[in-house]
Amino acid sequence: MNNAQPFVDFLRRMTALVEAKASTAEMLREVPVALKPVLAGEAWLPKDLSVPNPDKYQQYLLYADPKGRFSVVSFVWGPGQYTPIHDHTVWGAVGQLRGQEISTNYARTPTGLRVSSVDTLTAGETISFAPEGGDIHEVRNGSDQVSISIHVYGADIGRIERHIFDLDGAVKPFISGYSPGPVPQWPL
Ligand code: FE
């Protein structure tokens, strides 16, 4: 078996789901299932796309669907690194490949934001979310080592406009982009 096979199988499954026009509810159920084999090892992940940056968490684009229906990103966290509070505006799913990631989830209130829940993902675990069920969070490395997670979204997430938030409720437009790195050519 080729090293890339678990990830290629995942991309084929994702493409089949979007071709079949799967609903958000189906994506929230099916994407975590499809991610599980990808989380069993790191041999499929190009080394260049698993490198932390001491200045900032990295978001390497692993694959963007040519029609913009989904994208897959490796998040590589150095110790102590974290995101701004942000939303996605589309469904998402995360699988933890290495280490631990902590998502602090927020709900809007008349005066700002309040913490609604906290999710901790350890290697091999998955989670999914959608705007309908609460879409605002801050994510951080939950370990003192490098952590890596695989994020899947229902759009070309680095290129769409979404939002970052202050705790007092201030909202700013946000386009995350992707970290510089070679986008792999997967043998699909
Ligand atoms: Fe997020």
Image (cartoon, helix red, strand yellow):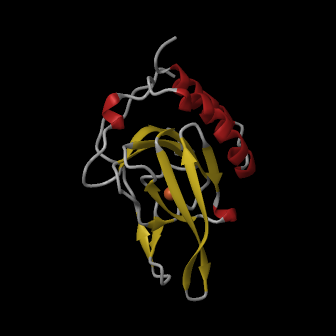
Front residue of 125 and 184: 125
Left or right, 181 with respect to 127, comes to: left
- Give the tally of numbered discs: 0
Left or right, 183 with respect to 25, comes to: left
- Specify whether residue 58 is in view: yes
Front residue of 123 and 47: 123
Left or right, 7 with respect to 13, comes to: left
In the rendered image, residue 114, in percent from the top left (x then y), is placed at 57, 77
Measuring 59% from the left and 64% from the top, which residue is drawn there? 135
In the rendered image, residue 60, in percent from the top left (x then y), is placed at 38, 43
Measuring 64% from the left and 50% from the top, which residue is drawn there? 128
- Specify whether residue 73 is in view: no
Residue 35 lies in quadrant: top right
In the rendered image, residue 173, in percent from the top left (x then y), is placed at 43, 71
Left or right, 59 with respect to 6, comes to: left
Name above or below for residue 40 compared with residue 123: above
Front residue of 17 and 165: 165
Measuring 46% from the left and 17% from the top, which residue is drawn there? 3
Name above or below for residue 155 compared with residue 125: below
Q: Residue furthest front?
A: 144
Measuring 41% from the left and 66% from the top, which residue is drawn there? 84
In the rendered image, residue 146, in percent from the top left (x then y), is placed at 37, 43
Q: Residue furthest top?
A: 1
